[in-house]
Amino acid sequence: MQCQRCGKNLGEYLCSKCGKIVCANCKTQIDGKIICLDDYHSEVPYEGQLKPIKTKKRGSGVLKSLSITLLIVLIGILGIFFYVNYLISTFPIPEGLPFISDLLKTYQDFGQLLIIAVGFFFVIITIAFFVTRK
């Protein structure tokens, strides 16, 4: 007779709980009694027989990689910003073109705001990562 649990193999054993005929792959033995895997998993775990399964929390990997990405972006922006500021400070501004100094000042203000924004998002995502990690 076919296994009444999987239907693939020849059933050789009788479950002492439900009476199903099961194959060697679909049975287990507890306290000398043969039990089908369906009844085995529905029972309260016997001590030493079943170990608790650790489940991986979803989302923490995404937050971690997003934090690392934002940190790298922040470091890159800082590097570019400071290098360009150095170039601006050494660049002589012609006397007859006052709008260039206004443009450079706008660039500096934008760079500072961008650094603050990326830093803020980095801190928020890092906090979210540690909160969801528990």
Image (cartoon, rainbow, N blue to C red):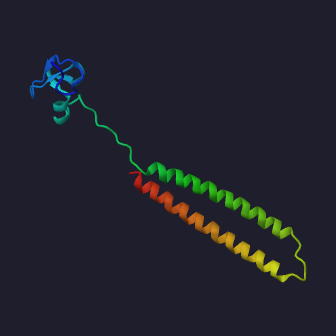
* Occupied quadrant, residue 42: top left
Residue 77 visible within the image: yes
Q: Is residue 5 above or below residue 10?
A: below
**Front-lying residue, 7 or 43:** 7
Residue 32 visible within the image: no
129 relative position to 32: left or right: right
Q: Is residue 88 above or below residue 42?
A: below
Q: Is residue 25 above or below residue 117?
A: above
The residue at 77%/80% (across/down) is 102
* Occupied quadrant, residue 3: top left
119 relative position to 55: left or right: right
Q: How many marks?
A: 0
* Occupied quadrant, residue 4: top left
Residue 20 x, y percent position in the rendering: 12, 25
Residue 38 x, y percent position in the rendering: 18, 32
45 relative position to 102: left or right: left
Residue 107 x, y percent position in the rendering: 73, 73
The residue at 77%/77% (across/down) is 103
Q: Is residue 36 above or below residue 84?
A: above
The residue at 21%/25% (across/down) is 7
In which quadrant is the N terminus drawn? top left
Residue 73 x, y percent position in the rendering: 63, 57
The residue at 69%/74% (across/down) is 109
